[in-house]
Image (cartoon, rainbow, N blue to C red):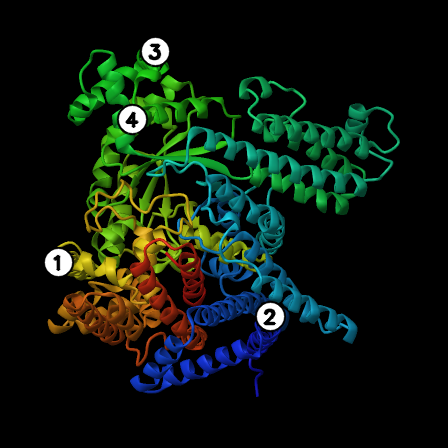
Amino acid sequence: MSPDRQQPLRDDIRLLGTLLGDTLRAQEGPRLFDAVERVRALAKRARHGSPADFATLDRTLQELQLGEALTVARAFAHFLSLANIAEQHHRVRRRRDYERTTDAPQQGSFPDSFSRLLAAGVTPDTLYEHVRSLQIELVLTAHPTEIVRRSLRQKARHMAALLERRDRPDLTPAERADVLDSLRREVTAAWRTSEARAGGGGLTPGDEVRGGLVVIEQTLWDAVPQHLRALDRALRDATGRPLPVEAAPIRFGSWIGGDRDGNPNVTPDVTVQACLLARWMAADLYWREIDALRSELSMRDGSDELRARVGNASEPYRALLKEVRDRLADTRACLGRMLDNESLERASTDTRAYWQPDELAEPLHLCRRSLQQTGADIVAEGRLLDVIRRVACFGLSLARLDLRQDARRHTEALDAVTRQLGLGSYAAWDESERRAFLNRASRDEGRGIRAALEAKAQFSADVRDVIETFQAAATLPAGSLGAYVISMAGNASDVLAVEVLQLASGIRPPLRVVPLFETLTDLGRAGVCMRDLLDIDWYRKRSGERQEVMIGYSDSAKDGGRLAAAWALYTCQEDVVAACAARGVHLTLFHGRGGTVDRGGGPARLAIQSQPPGSVNGSLRVTEQGEAIDAKFGILGIALRTLEEYTTATLTTTLQPAKDPERRWRDRMQHLADASRAAYRRLVYGSPEFAAYFWSATPEAEIGQIKIGTRPARRVPADGSTSVEGLRAIPWVFAWTQTRLMLPAWLGVGEALEEALRDGHLDELTEMYDAWPFFRATLDLIEMVLAKASPHISERYDKALVPEHLWPVGEELRERLRRTVAAVLAVARHSELVEDNPILRRSIDVRNPYVDPINLVQIEILRRLRRAGEDRLLREALLVTVNGVAAGMRNTG
C-alpha cells in the first residue's frame, strides 16, 4: 500500500491547531476556548447538514458579546493562516520527497522540460542558445488590498522554517522539544500581535517600498543563485555546455514607489527615495557577501594579472576584495546621504562609490580568472560565482523601478506647454495634429518645449507633478529605472508624448516607453495603435527596433467580464504580434496579472503555455502583486519552484508554441465572448438596481476607509454617485471575494455557455476544452473560483445588510451562479467542481467551516458600523474579519 502523501500535511495542521488551542486557553481563558470549539463544531455540522444547522450557528454567534464573537473569528483567522503556512511548507516537502524517491523528474522542472524538448526534436545547440538568451522579468507591485502586516508575515516564515526543521529524522528528543517550544512561542506571539498597524494609520508609500524589498533581502537574494545552479546543472546534462556566467534569464522590476496612476501619494520625491533605498539595500547586501567571500578566499597564490593589480600582498584575493568592500561601504554611505536629501547631482559624483554594475563585477571576474588559472576551479565555482550571478541579475538597484502614469496626465501637461508657447490647446487637437507637433518636437530634441517645462511654477499642481517626475528621473543614477508605462493608452501620440517629455527633460539614456492597453475597446485597437506607432521612423530608431506592450487583465475583466476579457487579451496579443513581426520589431509582452483569477491570476506555467502562438518569444514580463509576492516567493523552496516554472514555461512556449486554434473554434469563442460580455454589462452597468445592491451587500466602502493600501479605490475622487464605473478593479474583486459570491470571475460565463449548449454545440465545446490550451485554462480557472463560492454566505449578507427591495438582485445572482456551475460542469464533463484536483477540493472543504463563522461576525460588524458611523474599534474588528476571509480564500483582490 502506497504511503499517504497528504498525511504529513494533516499532521502539521493538527499540530499547529493544537498549539493555537493551547494559546487560546492560556491567553483568553477556558470559557473563550470552549466558545471557539462550540462554534467550530457547529460550523462543521452546518456545512454538511441542513439550513437549520446554519441558522443555529448564526444564532450562537449572535448570542455572544461582540468582543467574544470577534475573538472567535480571530481564532479561526489565525487557524486559517496556520493552515496556509502548513500547506506552503508541504509543497516544499513534497517536491523534495519527489526528487529523493522518484526516478522521473518533476513535471515542469529543468530536467523534465529539457528532456521533453530534446525528445521532440529540439537540438542541443538550439536549446542552449534559447536558455542563454531568455529575458524574463518579474515586476513586483504594491497591492491596494495587502492586509497582512509584515511582522505577521515574518512570523509565518519563522514557523515554516521550524516545520522544516521538525521534518529532520535525526533530531534528538531534546532538539524536537526545542522546535515545539519555538513553534509555541511563534503562535503565541502572532496571537498577541495586532492585525492593525501601530498607531492605527494607513500604509505610506515608504512602507510599501520597504515591504517589497523585504522579499528580495530575505528570499530572492538566496533563491537566485540556487536557481541558476540548478539551471546550470540541467543545461550541462542536456547540452554538455554550462550556463554562461553573465546569463540572467530572470530579473526583477518594481512598480512600488513608481506607480503614480491615480495615486497622489506617489510623488517625485517618493520615487527618488524608492530608487535610493533599493540601491542602499543592494550595497548593504553586497557588502555582506564580499565580507564573507574575503574570509573564504585566504589563498596565498594568485595569477600574474591579480598580482599586477594588488602588488606583493601575501593574500592577494583578500587585498583586492578589501578594496571592493571599502567601496561598497562608501557606496552605502553616499546613498545614505542622498536619502537624507543631499543633492543627487553632487553625491553621484563620488568616485569612491559604485554606480555601474560592471564596476563591481570587474574585480570579481578577476578573482575568478585567477582561481581558474591557479587550479582552484572548485573554489571559483562557489560563493564567488554566486555573487557574480547576483550582480548579473540584481545589478546595483535590486529591481529597476518602472514609472507609470495615466495618458491623460501627459495630455494635460503638454496642453499647458502648448498654451504657454502660444500654439493653442494640445488637448483639443486631433490625433494627426498631436503627432505633427510631437514629430517637430522630436527633431529639435525637445529643446523647443524645455523652457516651458522649466517655467513649471505657473502650471497646476497636477501638471507640475508630471513635469517634476520626468525631471527627477533625469537626476537618478543610471540603471535605477526600467520602463515608463502609460495607463489607458489608446493612440500612438500617447507614446510619442512620453518620448518627447523625456527628450525635453534630459533623461539619458531614455526609458523604454510601454503602452498599457486595459479596456476592451483599447485592447481591440492595440494592433492599429502599434502599426501607427511603428511606422514613425524616428520612434523606430529611438526604440532600437524593440517594443514592449503591456496588456491589462484587471480593467478588461471589470469592463466586460472574465470570459470576454480573456478572449480580448488573446486576440489583442495576436494582433500586436503580427504588427511587430511585419515591421521586424522584437516584441516583449508585459502581462499585468493580478493575484486572483478575476484579474488574470492562476498557475504561471498554465498561463504562459496557453498564450497565442508567437506571443512568448524568449522574452516576457509579468507583474507579481502584493499577496502573490509572499505566496510565490516568501519561502525559499517555493521561490525556487516559482522561478523554475517561469523559466521552463517561457522556454517551452517559445520553442513549442501552441497551435493556432481552428477557425470554427475562434468563431465559437467569439460568440461566447460576445454573449458573456452582453450578459455581464446588462447587469453591472445596465441595471439601475445593481450598483445600489453592490454597495449595500459588500463591505467595499468600509474596507476602503481602513486604508490598507496607499492607492485610492477610485481612479478619480468619488462624485457622490453610486456608480461602480470609476471603482478600480482590485477593490471590485476584493469586495465580492469577502462575501464569497466571487461574481467578477464568472458573471456572464453561464449565460454564454447555456446559449451554446441550447444551440447544440456541446460536442464542439468539449472538443475545444480537450484540444485548445487557452480554452481549457480559462474554463479550469473559472471552475476553481466557482468551487470557492458560497452562495448561502452571500445570502446572509443580503438578509442582514441589503434593503428588502433589493433582495431580488441577490437572488438572481445566486441563481446565475447555480446555472453557471451546471454549464461549466457540462463542458468539463465533471460531476463536481474541481474533481480532477482532489488536493484543492479537500483544501476548500477543510477551510469552509472556519471561514463561515468569520463571515457571520463580519456581517454583524458591518451592521453596527453602518448604524454607528465612524468607530475605530469596529474598524479594527472589521480588519480582523477581512484578514480571516482572505486567509481562508487564499486571496483578496
Tag 1, which secondary structure?
A: loop
Q: Is residue 784 left or right of residue 558?
A: right
The residue carrying mark 4 is: 496
Circle nearer the viewer, 1 or 2: 2
The residue carrying mark 2 is: 27
Q: Is residue 666 above or below residue 291?
A: below
**Residue type at numbered disc 1:** Ser
Local crowd size for mark 3, using a 10 Å CA cut-off: few (<14), some (14–19), many (≥20): few
Tag 2, which secondary structure?
A: helix
Q: In which quarter of the image is the N terminus?
A: bottom right
**Residue type at numbered disc 2:** Gln
Local crowd size for mark 2, using a 10 Å CA cut-off: few (<14), some (14–19), many (≥20): some
**Could you say which disc has been placed on residue 252 in the image?**
none
C-alpha separation, residue under disc 1 versus residue under disc 2? 50 Å
Circle nearer the viewer, 2 or 4: 2
Q: Which of marks 4 and 1 is nearer the N terminus?
A: 4
Q: Is residue 444 above or below residue 538?
A: above
Name the spot of residue 167 as percent of width and height, x first: 67, 71
Q: In which quarter of the image is residue 43?
A: bottom left
Circle nearer the viewer, 4 or 1: 1
Name the spot of residue 129 as percent of width and height, x first: 51, 44
C-alpha separation, residue under disc 4 versus residue under disc 1? 39 Å
State the residue in front, 259 or 537.
Answer: 259
State the residue in front, 393 or 307.
Answer: 393
The residue carrying mark 1 is: 687
The residue carrying mark 3 is: 451
**Residue type at numbered disc 3:** Ala
